[in-house]
Image (cartoon, helix red, strand yellow):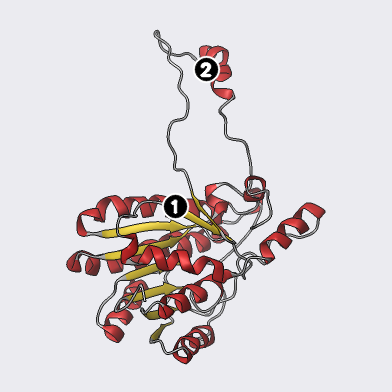
Amino acid sequence: MMLKDKVAVVTGSGGGIGREIALAMAEAGAKVVINDVGASLGGEGFSATPAEQTKALIEQRGGQAAISTDSVATWASAQKIVQCALDSFGRIDIVVNNAGILRDQIFHRMTPEEWDAVIAVHLNGSFYVSRAAATHFRQQESGAFVHITSTSGLIGNFGQANYSAAKLGIVALSKSIALDMKRYNVRSNCLAPFAWSRMTSSIPAETPEQKARVERLMRMGPEKNAPLAVFLASDAAAEVTGQIFAPRMHELFLFSQNRPIRSVHSESGWTPEKIAEIALPALRASFIPLERSGDVFSWDPV
């Protein structure tokens, strides 16, 4: 019961990873606000059914839950999500920013609408819900944010400029929250999940390499990510903030964050020609290769 007496808002918890996190938090003693608009993977449509299904599962197991079908993508509706927690359970202690959509497209064909839609849900939504909760966290001098990022942003992927940019932006948002709100005992961390879910089911599986990658992903159910989310939201993680974690089957990873890795110095300053002649050869060996998640995590999940 690591979350006994706490109230959690889990966005996008009508299915997949969000549902498993909501179930695990309820099992750990939290009262949970299940937020989900019930849209398609691309963000179209509306249905309360996914949220109702999650609520029913929690209540069948003896937990308490409330439903919010408001969108994370506007400031006004994000405030309603947090207000749902206050109206239903009297407080808010945890925010899990998990809601998301996909509009995958190769960059030179991506439309402004495809860009805006994904940024609105992932990045703007994470800000809006976090900001709505921040006022209450500051007043009570406690609170925990768990933001769902992705290796598509941390490492890279084809055809996901919108999604990758949003997910890496969430990392910077989380770090800023951690810095600004540490004085109020508020923590903010990121979780990069590995799982076969609706969000990964669109990965191409045409070539032998792609098929092997999908096969590895399919071994990892969304429930594998829930224990880390529960831990990060609990008082057991009181000293943990500003970090990026990834659960992969039975492995846990702590990700590095951007720091200078090599430098060159010229006493007389630099010209473009001098950079090409001296700096480039010195720095080239430390260039980061153009890799995707499957290149970096090349071994089978264990």
| Residue 217 visible from this viewpoint | yes
Q: Position of residue 204 (x, y in %)?
A: 73, 59
Secondary element under disc 1, as helix, strand or loop, is strand
- The disc placed on residue 101 is none
Q: Amino acid at mark 2?
A: Ala
In the displayed structure, would residue 229 be above or below residue 173?
Answer: below
User: Which residue is at 28% across, 66% downward?
Assistant: 143
In the displayed structure, would residue 263 be above or below residue 152?
Answer: above
Q: Label 1: how many residues lie within 10 Å, few (<14), some (14-19) or many (20+)?
A: many
Dot placed on the residue nearer the N-terminal end, 1 or 2? 1
Q: Label 2: how many residues lie within 10 Å, few (<14), some (14-19) or many (20+)?
A: some
- The residue that disc 2 covers is 279
Q: Position of residue 133 (x, y in %)?
A: 29, 68
- Left or right: where does residue 168 sit relative to residue 158? left
Q: Position of residue 47 (x, y in %)?
A: 53, 85
- Left or right: where does residue 74 sit relative to residue 152? left
* Camera-side mark, 1 or 2: 1
- The residue that disc 1 covers is 244
Q: CA distance from mark 1 to mark 2?
A: 32 Å
Task: Single out the residue that lies furthest toward the left.
Answer: 139
Secondary element under disc 2, as helix, strand or loop, is helix
In the displayed structure, would residue 214 be above or below residue 272?
Answer: below
State which quarter of the image contains the N terminus.
Answer: bottom left
State which quarter of the image contains the C terminus.
Answer: bottom right
